[in-house]
Structure formats: structure tokens, C-alpha cells
Amino acid sequence: MLNYNLAVPDVHDAGVLSALVAEGDELDVLVRAVDDWSVPTPAPGWTVAHQIAHLAWADANVLSALRTPDAFGAELGRAQAEGSGYADQAAAAGAARPRQVLLDQWRAGRAELAAALRDTPWDHAFPWYMSKVTPALMAPLRLMETWAHGQDVFDAVGVAHRPTDRLRHVASLGVLGRALSFAAVGLPEPADLFCVELTAPGGGTWVWGPEAARQRVQGSAVDFCLCVTRRRPRSETDLTASGEDAQKWLELARVFL
């Protein structure tokens, strides 16, 4: 599902764990106020319940991989056997649970995961799908997925999703995922250096890469995050690109397979 080769530029901030908890808590406030979890979300076939079930399932899988890596091998086998329907089947099974049961499961699981990541050495490698990861990488990955699936829920119920500086962790993964974006369609990562310059929610500027780079991406951080998590097509964002490779990247951009 992903392979970042354990390289984690700009996400070694221990504050990412606090950001992960805050992101989950914000989504929790929203879904508590939604009585009907059968409301469809932008993901085809997924309701609000599917979104929360997916987050709960993924948190449980991370805990399994972290604590019992040998047992997690069985989950990897299921993923390979079930192929593209793997995540959909797990989400459907979770969504069939009573609303309060699913909500309690998600709350307990995300709290347990945050504590487990906090108590594990930041550079400890453990298995994940198609790769190995560390808590230093998994924490922002869980934040990214919580934010992205949360965006689906915010969109479904028609509530504005207030951007915060927690998005810096998501944007960092987006920058890191450039090689993944090209590899996903069978292309090599461009050799040129890139500069990514984003306007933060608070009005500052976040920059990755040399400012003199010929390949440049600019725009708002929230639009960049929506693009790399594939919640909005590039055409619906304010992102601009200079350079052929930068243009191509925005067409392909992703942080997961």
C-alpha cells in the first residue's frame, strides 16, 4: 500500500502525536453529532460508518504490526489474497456494527495506538504493507489518514473542515510521496530537485527543497493536502506548477496506493 523506504524528512517532530490525537478528537466531535451514519460520503459505496470503521480497523492493524509482527503476517496474507476489495470488505464489516459499538471501538483503539507509538522507540522498524515503517513515520501516516477520511465525513454532512497547522505533517508526507506518485504509474522519479512552497493555514509559508529549483509547486497547504490525499483533483485547487516534471507530479500526486 505504501513504501517510503523509512525516510522521514520533516516529520520527526514528537508533536505529531499530539496532532494525531487532536485530529481524531476533532472528527469525534463531528461524528457524535451525526445521528445517521448511513449518510453516503464521497468515497463510492462508503457511508460515514464505513469511514469510521476503516479508521478503527487500520488503528488495530498498526497495533498488531507493532506488538505482534509475526501474527500481522496473516493480515498481510489476507491483503494479498483479497486484492483491491480488501479494505472495502473490512470497512463494510465494521460499518455493520451498531453505531455506539463502532464509536467506542474507534475511540479506544486510537487512544491505545497513540500510547503505543509514544512508548515505542521512534526509530523502531516494524512490518507494514509492502514495506517496513517506524513510529516516526506511522504517526504522521495515521494523522494523514484520519484527516483524509475525516474530510470525506465533513463533505458528506456539509460542514466546513477547518484547516489547522496539523496539516504540515500531511504536507510533509505529500512531499515525501513524490517517488511513490511516479512509481504508482510505472514511471521513475524525476532527477531534478523540486521546491514546494505552501501557504500555511495561519498565513505563514512552508517550504521544502531548494528555492532555486526549476521544478516548483506552489499554493495553499490545504489544497496541496487535498490533492495528495486524492480528495480533490488538481483542477479544483489553487496549486500551480512550474516545470514539466512538477506539472506531471500534480497530475499523479498521492500518499498511498
Image (cartoon, rainbow, N blue to C red):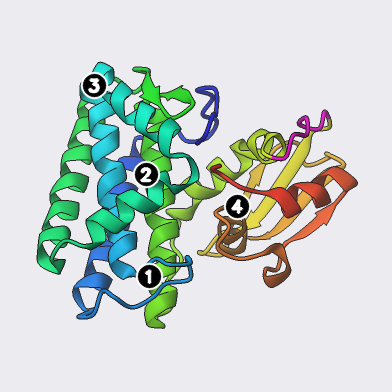
| Mark closest to the chain's N terminus, 4 or 1 | 1
Instruction: Name the residue located 25 percent from the left edge and 50 percent from the top edge.
Output: 56
Residue 109 shows in the view? yes
What number is the disc on residue 153? Answer: 1
Instruction: Name the residue located 50 percent from the left edge and 36 percent from the top edge.
Output: 1
Q: Which residues are magenta?
A: 185-191
Instruction: Report the residue marked by disc 3.
Output: 71
Secondary structure type for disc 2: helix
Other-residue count near label 1 (Cα within 10 Å), few / some / many at <14 / 14–19 / ≥20: many
What number is the disc on residue 228? Answer: 4
Distance in Å between CA atoms under marks 1 and 3: 32 Å
CB contact under 8 Å: marks 1 and 3: no
Instruction: Report the residue marked by disc 2.
Output: 142
Tag nearer the camera, 3 or 2: 3
Secondary structure type for disc 4: helix
Q: Nearer the viewer, residue 50 or 118?
A: 50
Instruction: Name the residue located 61 percent from the left edge and 63 percent from the top edge.
Output: 223
| Image coords of residue 173 (percent x, y) | 54, 41
What number is the disc on residue 229? Answer: none
